[in-house]
Amino acid sequence: MQRYFCKEKDNDIFTLSSDDSYHIVKVMRYNIGTEIEIVFDNCLYISSIISTDKIVKAKIVKEINNPLNSINVTIAQSLVKEQKMDYILQKGCELGAQRFIPLEVTNSIIKLDNKKDKKIERWQKVVKEASEQSKRLDIPIVTNVYTIKDLLKEDFDLKILCSVNEKEKSIKKVLSKVKQSDRILFVIGPEGGFTKEEEALFIDNGFISTSLGERVLRTETASTFVLSVVNYIFMR
């Protein structure tokens, strides 16, 4: 059953967005009476379509008791090209990331300049669609583009710098005592890696330099790997 996120609810009637309405009518070709899943305020409802006139409306059939239980992980991802960023966001959604911070660093392949607002709008659409596909009850946040100085101001219980230069502290060791309630930040470098000065700045500000193993991972693989490890630790 197709899932949609909705922001408008009047008693037991949902009003879908214009984009979702188009998808329901033109792409999925659903008719009045078709049941869909709607997420509203982190709650899941089975709903029946009652109107397909331009904007789709649907009426609640039943509420599904499906508690929100996501791990609290933020991925600070150094800027990469569009297809790679889409992949990182999609897989991160599937694996439960709560927030994505696009990070501009010295070796970032792309510079957004005046395109930041359009890019963030696009990225937020990517995470919405990935959240629907993966049956989430929430949509991760994509923040504005940060610099390292911006990132250093953020407060987390555990701040992890994924480094190809680290040889002693493995991700297994660093996460061995983590609790599900902890707010964890993973910082992923660009394709050219962080500079020595950038790594030193992170470490001087409380980030734990952490190895992801003997192999050097592509930047678009790293976040999928760390989220998979966290999911394994908390697997029920």
Image (spheres, rainbow, N blue to C red):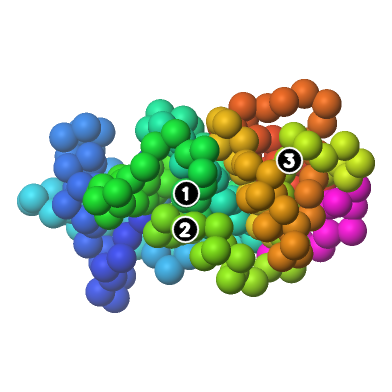
**How far apart are labels 2 and 3 at the CA level?**
19 Å
Q: Does the segment drawn in magenta span residue 174?
A: yes
Give SS at disc 1: loop
Q: Name the side, left or right, on which 105 lies relative to 70.
A: left
Residue 22 rendering spot, x and y as whole percentages: 17, 42
Q: Name the side, left or right, on which 9 lies relative to 79.
A: left
Do the residues under discs 1 and 2 have CB atoms within 8 angstroms?
yes
Can you identify the residue that label 1 sits on? 104
Residue lying at 61% horizontally and 65% vertically, measured from the top left: 152
Q: Residues within 10 Å of mark 3 (few under 14, many from 20)?
A: many
Q: Name the side, left or right, on which 149 lies relative to 49.
A: right
Q: Amino acid at mark 2?
A: Tyr
Residue lying at 75% horizontally and 57% vertically, measured from the top left: 203
Q: Earlier in the sequence, mark 2 or mark 3?
A: 2
What range of the chain is rendered magenta?
Answer: 173-183
The reply to whether residue 182 is visible in this rendering is: no
**How far apart are labels 1 and 3 at the CA level?**
17 Å
Can you identify the residue that label 2 sits on? 146
Q: As displayed, is residue 226 above or below residue 38?
A: above
Q: Residues within 10 Å of mark 2 (few under 14, many from 20)?
A: some
Residue lying at 82% horizontally and 31% vertically, measured from the top left: 213
Can you identify the residue that label 3 sits on? 163
Q: As displayed, is residue 228 above or below residue 13?
A: above
Give SS at disc 2: loop
Q: Amino acid at mark 1?
A: Glu
Q: Amino acid at mark 3?
A: Ser
